[in-house]
Image (tube, rainbow, N blue to C red):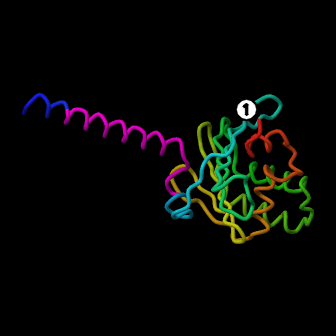
Amino acid sequence: MSSLNFWKVTAGVVAILGLLTTLVEAQSAGLPAPISADVLGNKTLTRRGEAVMRFFGLKVYDIRLWTSDRPHRDDEFFALELVYDLGLKGADIARRSAEEMRKIGYTDEAKLKRWTEIMTKVFPDVKQGDTLVGVSVPGKEARFYSREKFIAAVPDPEFAKAFFGIWLSEKTSEPRLRERLLGGK
């Protein structure tokens, strides 16, 4: 092989390795693969904003909002990704979620009780480093995933609105977190 061909082949290999590295980095920085394959099809979601949730100064989780367009719209697919910094019981996550739904205006106690029972079945116990992702399928359902797999769907559009409203409603108990998720500072 001539030295010119050697350098062409070497440059080609370096370019391919660079492309593969970029693809791997993009995948690892993105949403879990099961979400893309299962729900989104040809839709692409990009990270819109992120924040840290703290409770009495203790970091509970990192949260990221993924949307298909800007600005965020509730009638489009979107995802909330939570990466936990603490270990929590799924039942505790469910109870806290119901409390937050109540704070943003959902006061039908029978409905909240039913939703709490559903969330208790859906939400797994988490440990530090675990990821849970909720995907809003507008007008249809909320779908939940771990980093590795689909967990469950809750086919109730009102539940989906209430659940994602915990973070995205104007009535959220965490307005600065909401602002950061929506792309503010």
Task: Provide residue 176's location: percent of width, then percent of height.
Answer: 83, 39
Quarter of image, res 173? top right
Tell me the kind of residue under disc 1.
Lys
Residue 54 shown left or right of residue 172 in the figure? left
Q: Nearer the viewer, residue 123 or 74?
A: 74
At 49% across and 42% down in the image, what residue appears?
28
Q: Is residue 20 magenta?
A: yes
Q: Which residue is mark 1?
A: 59
Name the magenta segment's main secondary structure: helix
Image x and y of residue 140, in percent: 69, 71
* 66 versus 142 height, above or below: above
Q: Is the residue marked by circle 1 packed among few (<14), some (14-19), or many (20+) residues within 10 Å?
A: few
- Does 21 appear in magenta? yes
Query: Is residue 118 or residue 29 the one in the foreground?
Result: 29
Foreground of the two, 152 or 1: 1
Q: Identify the residue shown where x is 52% and y is 56%.
A: 149
The residue at 59%/59% (across/down) is 151
User: What residue is at 62 percent from the left and 36 percent from the top?
Assistant: 128
Please, is residue 148 above or below residue 56 in the view?
A: below
Query: Which region shows up in magenta?
Result: 8-34
Mark 1 falls on what kind of element? strand
Outermost residue on the front side: it is: 4
* Furthest residue in direction left, as rendered: 1
User: Which quadrant, please, contains the N terminus?
Assistant: top left
